[in-house]
Amino acid sequence: MDAMSEAGIEPSDGSQYHFDPGTYDELIAEVPLYERLQEESIAAIPFAPERVLELGIGTGETTRRLLARHPDAQILGLDSTPGMVFKARQLPIEVQLARMEDPLPDGPWDLVISVLAVHHLTDEGKRDLFRRIRETSRAMVIGDVVAVPEAERRTPLTPDFDLPCTLEQLVEWSGGSATWSDGDLAVVSATF
């Protein structure tokens, strides 16, 4: 059994992996400062959003925090894992099965937010996603793992699955600015 299977991540087609919502919380517990990353991502939201698109909703942790801060927000959550979508449908929001590489749902959006999902895209995929977000949204917040020298890495990564870019690249490609960083975790916020 490989490390991906042990972590509850199963390949769907040989190139894309799907997380198991039953073991996801154990997997995410390995991310140092996970709670702080979530807090800082919500704190980076530049205004009270009405329409929110969340990319990579997972088990809904970011959604719960966003609704606690902005209870009137209408959220559409996307995830590429059927089990995660099923679990997230327990939240008082709309949820759809979709990949970040797919066309974004019709906007306009006040905010597009993503925590610990964008690092699964290639650099070209990140740039393309950010371009599409800028075309349909007033603001974007990305909380994610970033590339740092190996000696400084604290977050466990899987080669060819986790593809973080540097914080400088994330800032440049998103058109935003870093609002928080600690080691290999960072939050970037942009308004358009």
Image (tube, rainbow, N blue to C red):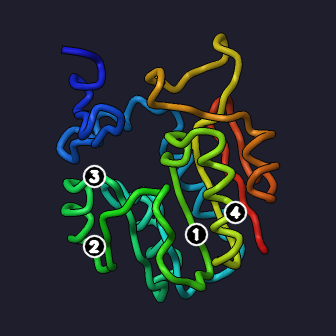
Please provide percent x and percent y for residue 23.
21, 38
Q: Amino acid at mark 1?
A: Val
Residue 113: name its quadrant.
bottom right
Horizontal placement of 144 versus 44: left or right?
Answer: left
Q: Mark 4 or mark 2: which comes first in sequence?
A: 2
Q: Is residue 192 above or below residue 147?
A: below
Q: Amino acid at mark 4?
A: Arg
Horizontal placement of 33 versus 185: left or right?
Answer: left
Please provide percent x and percent y for residue 37.
56, 47
Mark 3 near mark 1, Cβ–Cβ under 8 Å? no
> Disc 4 marks which residue?
131
User: How far separated are the C-alphas under marks 3 and 2?
Assistant: 16 Å
> Disc 1 marks which residue?
112
User: How far separated are the C-alphas under marks 4 and 3?
Assistant: 24 Å
- Nearer mark to the viewer, of 1 and 4: 4
User: How far separated are the C-alphas under marks 1 and 4?
Assistant: 12 Å
> Disc 3 marks which residue?
81
Q: Residue at x 72, y 60 (%)?
A: 189
Mark 1 near mark 4, Cβ–Cβ under 8 Å? no
Front position in the image: 129 or 86: 129
Mark 4 near mark 3, Cβ–Cβ under 8 Å? no
Q: Mark 1 or mark 4: which comes first in sequence?
A: 1
> Disc 2 marks which residue?
91
Question: Which quadrant, please, contains the N terminus?
Answer: top left
Q: Amino acid at mark 2?
A: Leu
Q: Mark 3 or mark 1: which comes first in sequence?
A: 3
